[in-house]
């Protein structure tokens, strides 16, 4: 019944997505932070700059992603979509009103943003446009190599956009009814999804729909975000938990150095960053995690653009930039 309902809501679509990607978008967790920020020279001494500080009334930013340092976009409440560059202030992009956006994915010329009411926005040549299909919330989206995308959301929903550009439901395990918060693709036939109550779901198969199986994460707390390479995967969540596994998906806890809820994770090769409540930023380097910055509004998502350049976004319009 659930698969039929979702399939009927996603029976239309006209967008092609190519290239490997993942989106790290949580929702909820820890309360609002203050206005301070211990960035460069703060705990851990990262080279973080405040691009846009927290401001009362500013829309929350919940997702950030890019195809590289030159094309990084953040999305959030009130149809907020902004392009981020190191040289300039965040530049608003044109989008239709009324969308509460929670995640963004960019791959080359393709870009998708998702959110409440099963919203899917697509970036065109001059502006973003899209549709809302129903009552479910989509918390995350990831592009797949060769075309198509996977999006996940409330009620254990997983939907895919096929290469034929139509949205359809995936047959998720019957026991999975919790909110699914993040999705990351190791390849088109190897996808990891995480969510509330320690949920980890693994999708495999030669083509969509994938075959989904629930894995034992070893933790009970909510899991908010995941980041993967071809050989390693990290998951972050409530209470500062960080899980790590190789291709065998043997999940093991790594000490994070913080008890703050962690809402986003991303990496660029030799380092991985996670962000969360109270402006917390932790970095994994040389196999160990340490606190790189803390203090300020809750950070909801992070994107490593490469070469040590990283963007973090969060509550009350906060945008932080880590210089290479």
Image (tube, helix red, strand yellow):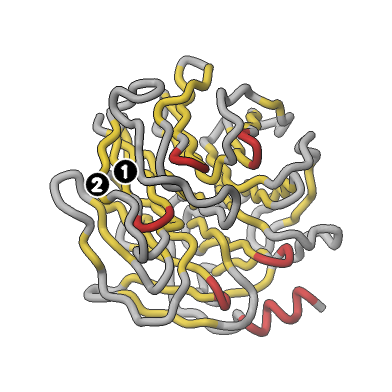
Residue lying at 65% horizontally and 41% vertically, measured from the top left? 238
Residue lying at 66% horizontally and 49% vertically, measured from the top left? 194
Q: Is residue 11 above or below residue 219?
A: below
Measure the C-alpha gap from mark 2 to mark 1.
5 Å
Where disc 1 sits, the SS reads strand
Where disc 2 sits, the SS reads strand
- Asked whether residue 18 appears in the rendered view, the answer is no
Say if mark 2 contacts mark 1, CB within 8 Å: yes
Q: Is residue 270 above or below residue 15?
A: above
| Residue neighbourhood size for the residue with mark 1, other residues' Cα within 10 Å, grouped as few (<14), some (14–19), many (≥20) | many
Q: Is residue 227 above or below residue 75?
A: above
| Residue neighbourhood size for the residue with mark 2, other residues' Cα within 10 Å, grouped as few (<14), some (14–19), many (≥20) | many
Residue in the foreground of this view, choosing between 192 and 146:
192
Q: Position of residue 175 (x, y in %)?
A: 85, 58
Residue hosting label 1: 320
**Mark 2 or mark 1: which comes first in sequence?**
2
Residue in the foreground of this view, choosing between 298 and 127:
298
**Numbered circle sitting on residue 51:** 2
Q: Position of residue 318 (x, y in %)?
A: 35, 51
Q: Position of residue 213 (x, y in %)?
A: 79, 50
Q: Is residue 65 above or below residue 234?
A: below
In the figure, is residue 211 to the left or right of 322? right
Q: Position of residue 7 (x, y in %)?
A: 68, 79
The quadrant of the rendering that contains the C terminus is top left
**Numbered circle sitting on residue 292:** none
Residue 15 lies in what quarter of the image? bottom left
């Amino acid at each position: 019944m659930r698969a039929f309902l979702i399939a009927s809501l996603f029976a239309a679509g006209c967008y092609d997505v190519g290239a490997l990607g993942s989106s790290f978008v949580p929702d909820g967790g820890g309360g609002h932070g203050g206005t301070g920020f211990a960035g460069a020279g703060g705990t851990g001494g990262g080279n973080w700059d405040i691009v846009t500080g927290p401001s009362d009334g500013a829309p929350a930013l919940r997702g950030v992603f890019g195809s590289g340092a030159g094309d990084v976009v953040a999305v959030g409440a009130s149809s907020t979509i902004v392009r981020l560059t190191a040289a300039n202030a965040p530049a608003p992009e044109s989008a239709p009103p009324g969308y509460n956006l929670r995640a963004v994915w960019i791959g080359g010329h393709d870009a998708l943003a998702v959110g409440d009411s099963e919203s899917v926005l697509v970036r065109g040549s001059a502006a973003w446009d899209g549709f809302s299909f129903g009552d479910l919330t989509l918390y995350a989206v990831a592009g797949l190599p060769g075309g198509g995308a996977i999006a996940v959301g409330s009620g254990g929903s997983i939907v895919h956009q096929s290469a034929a550009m139509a949205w359809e439901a995936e047959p998720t395990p019957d026991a999975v009814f919790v909110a699914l918060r993040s999705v990351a693709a190791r390849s088109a036939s190897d996808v990891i999804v995480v969510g509330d109550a320690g949920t980890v779901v693994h999708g495999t198969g030669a083509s969509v729909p994938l075959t989904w199986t629930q894995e034992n994460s070893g933790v009970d707390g909510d899991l908010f975000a995941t980041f993967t390479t071809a050989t390693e995967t990290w998951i972050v969540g409530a209470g500062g938990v960080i899980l790590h596994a190789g291709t065998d998906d043997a999940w093991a806890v790594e000490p994070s150095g913080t008890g703050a809820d962690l809402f986003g994770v991303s990496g660029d090769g030799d380092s991985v960053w996670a962000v969360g409540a109270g402006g917390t930023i932790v970095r994994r380097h040389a196999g160990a995690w340490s606190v790189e910055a803390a203090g300020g509004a809750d950070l909801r998502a992070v994107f490593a653009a490469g070469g040590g350049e990283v963007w973090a976004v969060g509550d009350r319009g906060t945008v932080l930039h880590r210089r290479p």
